[in-house]
Amino acid sequence: MKRALALVICAATLAAASAAFTQSFSVQLYGAKGPRQPINFSHQIHAGKLGMNCLYCHSSAAKSPIANIPAVSTCMGCHKMVHADKPEIEKLAAYFDRGEQVPWVEVYALPAHVKFNHKRHVRAGLRCQECHGPVETMPVLYQYPSLKMGWCVTCHRSRLNDPVHPASMDCVVCHH
């Protein structure tokens, strides 16, 4: 009986690991080009040249597991006046006037079996660039790191002994 139970547990674990492994290949990586977006938005200008804090636009990253894509009204707070005559800003204004959000194409996509909590990482003092790469240098946003499990585990291991915010190696922290 114990042998049968052990076999069932091993088979279930192997099946779950196989599913997770194959799902990790379904994540679309665009390389250093990034996906084509409905509006040519440059993090290089906003986060780099202008020095805007990531949390100005992605405010929920500090208070929620999910980092928001900014509402068009956030963009239009400046762009009602700044560069309002530029073609890309005119596209942005058209979305605003119609009361629609910009249908941005997701750049950072994780497999369905992985959960990432932005709030936890922001509160631990990680800079956005530690996971998202040098966003302030990117004219087009692209997925900088692989975001594969080994990449995350390496970071967690390096922070196990952090006196204020020690990282966890418990599987259910990311896989739940």
Image: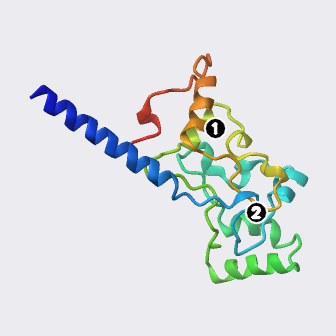
| The quarter of the displayed image where residue 40 is located | bottom right
Residue neighbourhood size for the residue with mark 1, other residues' Cα within 10 Å, grouped as few (<14), some (14–19), many (≥20)? some
User: In the drawing, does residue 130 fall left or right of residue 48?
Assistant: left
**Image point 49% across, 27% down: which residue?**
169
- The percent position of residue 73, horizontal first and vertical second, equals 69, 68
In the foreground, 71 or 165 = 165
In the foreground, 160 or 74 = 160
Q: Does dot 1 land on a helix, a strand or a loop?
A: helix
| Residue that protrudes farthest toward the left in the picture | 1
User: In the drawing, does residue 166 fall left or right of residue 16?
Assistant: right
In the foreground, 34 or 43 = 34
**Image point 76% across, 57% down: which residue?**
32
The residue labelled by disc 1 is: 122
Q: Does dot 2 land on a helix, a strand or a loop?
A: helix
Looking at the image, residue 115 lies above or below residue 99 = above
User: In the drawing, does residue 49 fall left or right of residue 89?
Assistant: right
- The percent position of residue 51, horizontal first and vertical second, equals 86, 49
- The percent position of residue 70, horizontal first and vertical second, equals 66, 61
Task: Please identify, in this view, whether the residue under mark 1 or under mark 2 is nearer the observer.
Answer: 2
**Image point 52% across, 46% down: which residue?**
65
- The percent position of residue 72, horizontal first and vertical second, equals 68, 69
The residue labelled by disc 2 is: 33
Residue neighbourhood size for the residue with mark 2, other residues' Cα within 10 Å, grouped as few (<14), some (14–19), many (≥20)? few
Q: Which mark is residue 24?
A: none
Q: Amino acid at mark 1?
A: Val
The mark nearer the N terminus, 1 or 2, is: 2
Looking at the image, residue 5 lies above or below residue 50 = above
Locate the C terminus by quadrant. Answer: top left
